Image: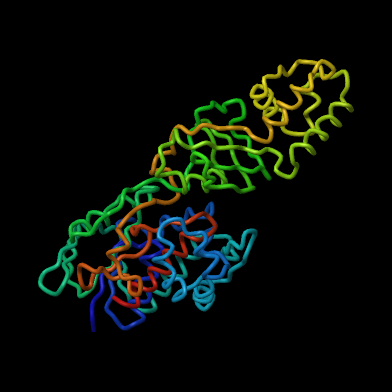
Amino acid sequence: MKSVAVIGGGAAGMIAAVFAAKNGNRVILLEKNEKLGKKVYITGKGRCNLTNDCSPEEFLENVVSNAKFLSGPIRSFSPQDTQDFFESLGLKLKTERGDRVYPLSDKASDVTKTLTKELQKRGAEIALNERVLQLIKEDERFCVVTDRRRIGCDSAIVCTGGLSYPSTGSTGDGYAFARGFGHGVTELKPSLTGIETSENFLPVQGLSLKNVSLCAKHGKKTLFRETGEMLFTHFGISGPLALGVSALINRIPPEEVTLILDLKPGLDEEKLKKRIERDFAEAKGKTVSNGMLKLMPARLIRVVLSRAGIRGDKRIADLTKNEVQNLVFAMKSYEIGVKRLRPIEEAVITSGGVNVKEIDPRTMESKRVKGLFFAGEVLDLDAFTGGFNLQIAFTTGYIAGNNA
């Protein structure tokens, strides 16, 4: 019987330990927190969007970094396999908007409980409140040095996560272990995070917009264009659209990125102009601000009018054709400058990590050190929101656990 140490009890670590134990290995899962799956508990706003009900091809389209590396693995353990796996363990699932898959109970804790129960059933040892300080190789075996003891093992799987949400235990330990074995670690950046803007949006702080379109440009190249939800904050913008943009601009100097907000993507400029003129005709004798109340929230009107160079207390009857055109432009092409992304500690996911060129995608084993495996966010793999990042954790964890 071979012994396997899994370092890190998050999504990747738990599933890696399950499959390593299922294969008849003696498994110890080491977690420095007081419980397993601490980051899993906060995913999907506490509901755990554990995967996306899509094909492997659609999954790969949503991977931002190193999709090619995942093209084989995602077919070995696909989103459908993830759903089948959890349902086989008794966890009922449901699919919501955007093909996002959640536990039927809406409780992230049920995902962790299901995996914990399976770990116990398979005889894996779970060591909580035990931090791994060092991972070294002595002859053909590994030695895991914790703050309590030294553990010898035949294989080690590093599933320590990234740098985002350090309160959940993601403090970059795995990068140090990887470097200790000569592995390269690509530059670590925040991904799926808020964007600090050069414009102050305090007048609309807390305002959430639905069915707006956000475009990100780098020079003449369009990096991102999607319709969805966005939130104004004290620092700039957040919400699904902003998070999506952040994944694509985190390696570009912020001053080179321009964001363009379209508040009425369902109407082209001509149709929007006619709509405004119709609303203004019905509000004759009123101020411009009052005439726009059917178009958008009152707080947003002030911001848009300021961008269009129109006073809110101006009477509709006194508006020029040029000013109406400026108003259309401000609503369809509201430019937003980028200062920086929010810190990596606030990001949903870490972009960058252990260089996947040094990892065998068929096994998740290091090409440098036999018996050393990596899985999950510690690798240089990241994707958009929608359950894709947890699927990366489950896929790489499954493969590492099966091959350790």
Left or right of 158: which side holds 102? right
Q: In which quadrant is the N terminus drawn?
A: bottom left
Q: In this view, does 14 lie above or below 239?
A: below
Q: Using the rendered view, name the quadrant where residue 295 is placed.
A: top right
Instruction: Tell me what residue is drawn at x 79 percent, y 33 percent.
Output: 273
Q: Is residue 249 above or below residue 356?
A: above
Q: Position of residue 145 (x, y in %)?
A: 17, 61
* Any part of residue 123 in sight: no
Looking at the image, the residue that sits furthest to the left is 139
Q: Nearer the viewer, residue 139 or 8?
A: 139
Instruction: Tell me what residue is drawn at x 21 percent, y 56 percent.
Output: 179
Q: In which quadrant is the C terminus drawn?
A: bottom left
Q: Nearer the viewer, residue 125 or 256?
A: 256
Q: Where is residue 84 in the image (x, y as percent from the top left)?
A: 53, 76
Q: Position of residue 281 (x, y in %)?
A: 88, 26
Left or right of 180: which side holds 255? right
Looking at the image, the residue that sits furthest to the front is 220
Q: Nearer the viewer, residue 289 or 218?
A: 218
* Any part of residue 389 in sight: yes
